Structure formats: C-alpha cells, structure tokens
Amino acid sequence: MHISLEQTIAELKKGGVVAIPTETVYGLAADATNDMALKKIFTTKQRPADHPLIVHISDISQVPDWVTDFPEVAVKLAKAFWPGALTLVLPAKPHVSRVVRGNEPTVALRVPNHPLALQLLKQSGLCVAAPSANLFTQLSPTTASHVEAGLGKTIPVLDGGACTVGIESTIVSVAADGQWQLLRPGMISEAEIAKVAGVPQQTNHTLATQKEAPTTPKAPGQHALHYSPRTPLTLYKDRQDLLAACDTLQNTDKSYAALLIGEGEVPACKVITLPDRPEKVAEQLYSSLHALDAMRVDRLLVELPPDTPVWMAVLDRLMRAGHQ
C-alpha cells in the first residue's frame, strides 16, 4: 500500500509504522520516542526485543539530544560521512527508550542520505527508528515491491525508488574516551574510518590490557543467520566448485539457479551475473537475491567475492545469508 509523504508523516505521528526509503535499504519506521510504536516494529518483523534499533535523525545538531558523550572522534566521523551510510553507536542519555536501545546503555544514530527520507525527518520534526523492512533474518528490501513481497501489502510504504547503496550501513561504536570499534562492515570501509578518526580501531588485545574492559555494544545485523532468501543457499569460494556442484545437480530432480560475481555462464542453469566491483555488487546484491528467490528453485548457488578489505561488507552479508 503506497502512501504519500504527508500520509507517512501523519501515520508516524499517530503511532503507526511505515516502510520508508533510505540509500541503504528500506526501513520499517516508527517514532523513536513512542514505545508503543516501536514495539510494533518488533512485532511486525518478528524481531527479538533485545536487538537495538537505529535512530534516523535529520542533522548532526540532534546528536546531543540522544547521547551523554559525543567524543571528538565521533564528531569527525559524523562530519565526514553524514548524511550517509554510517551509524554511530554512542552512550545513551537515560531518557532514551529502552525499547529502541534493546536494553543496551548505548544508542545507534544515523543521518540517512536519501532526499525523501531527509524531507520526511525535517518536515515532520520526528526522529525515527527504522530497521530493515523485512521479517527478521530474511532478505533486506531495496525497492517498495520487495517490502510488499516480504511483509505483505497491508504495510504502508513510502516509495522512494531503488536504494543506491543497497546494503545496510557501516556501524561504528565510539566510547566516551574516543576509542572506536567496527561493529558491522558496510560500504564505508574500516580504512576510511581510521583515516578520519586519526586513530586505529581498538582491538581485543587493547581491550584485554584495560583494567575494566568495556563490552562490545550489540548492533543490528550481528545475528549469525541474517539477510537470507527463503530458498536454501550454498556459498562457493571457487567458481570451479560451483560448476562441479551444478554438474552433480544436473543428474538429480532438483532445480537450481546461480549468482556469479563477474562474467560467466553455468550450463543448464538460470544465472544472474554481477559486475566485478564491490560498490556495484552491494547495490544489486539484495535485488539479485530477491530475483533468484522468486524463481522458486530448490537451491541457490552463490559465488563469494575475494576475502579482501574492499569486499568485506558484501562478504559479511553473503556469509550470514548462507549460514546454516
């Protein structure tokens, strides 16, 4: 059910949930200060209550409304990457809803880089929690039609076209003393973050040397099984292994389809090929998996990208999608 921006604002203000576009994926949005509305997100997604939600704000000036500390490292990152696909996890003020925090002492904040999402936030004056608009552990949506296929046509959707980044934001936790940790990889890389922060990521070794090692905050997308199509999926590090599996499947009554990174063909098999470029694979990854899922075959065969820093985010999503 597609609705207008004005209808979206009205629905959110009365405590409803609406699927909204961002540059990463579509989010299932609710007023981040309304506990009853926030609980509808968890119910609709069938998401465990201890999983924190990302709060989408319209501007860096709103950060102090949510956090007790906004360290200089976090300020640098926000100025460099907002609006954009970076989420900052910071110490939360006591008034911040325990529902949105997942009972954690921290809150996750992001300024989205999508014109319609920003217009919604600025015009409404709201800050919205908006995890991906899909059932828990299933494929994230990057179009309005993906939302409807996953959650049904009764969920109102603000259609903002296809997402341009295509996978969820990079999540970075910054402690009050300025030390930072990468909690979820995204298309803003660890190297880019370290360059702006001016200090390297704190490691488990550095944590172990402290008298009181802070715990790593929980963050969205850390569940072992996540971003998964309904069709069983097998991952292959080597294309020759994928082709060998296809040869085996040809001699069975099982149907199958494949996703390749870079040009190629698979005999007697429906194939989607993605360009051999990390940003293009990220942009098209979920839409490709949705398309493969819609083929209703018995198994999906997916080629993994190289295990290198530039492919970290895509590799993370695929490894979780294929976790058995």
Image (cartoon, grey):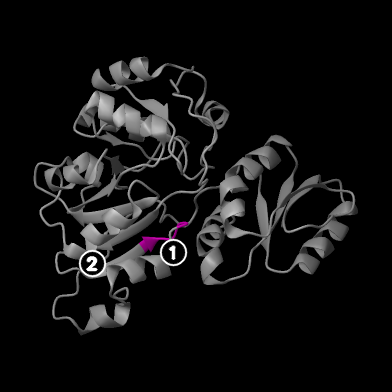
Of residue 268 and residue 188, the one placed in the foreground of this image is 188
Q: Is residue 74 left or right of residue 194?
A: left
Label 2 sits on what residue type? Thr
Q: Which residue is mark 1?
A: 189
Q: Is residue 324 visible in the rendered structure shown here?
A: no
Residue drawn at x 58%, y 44% is: 286
Of residue 130 and residue 218, the one placed in the foreground of this image is 130
> Which quadrant holds residue 74?
bottom left
Q: Which residue is mark 2?
A: 215
Place of residue 274 in the rendered image (x, y in percent of width and height, measured from the top left) = 69, 52
Residue 63 lies, with reference to residue 126, above or below; the image says below
Q: Earlier in the sequence, mark 2 or mark 1?
A: 1
Residue drawn at x 28%, y 73% is: 198
**Magenta span includes 185:** yes
Classify mark 1: helix, strand or loop.
loop
Residue 6 lies, with reference to residue 178, above or below; the image says above
Place of residue 196 in the rendered image (x, y in percent of width and height, measured from the top left) = 32, 67
Residues rendered magenta in the picture:
183-187
Place of residue 254 in the rendered image (x, y in percent of width and height, measured from the top left) = 82, 46
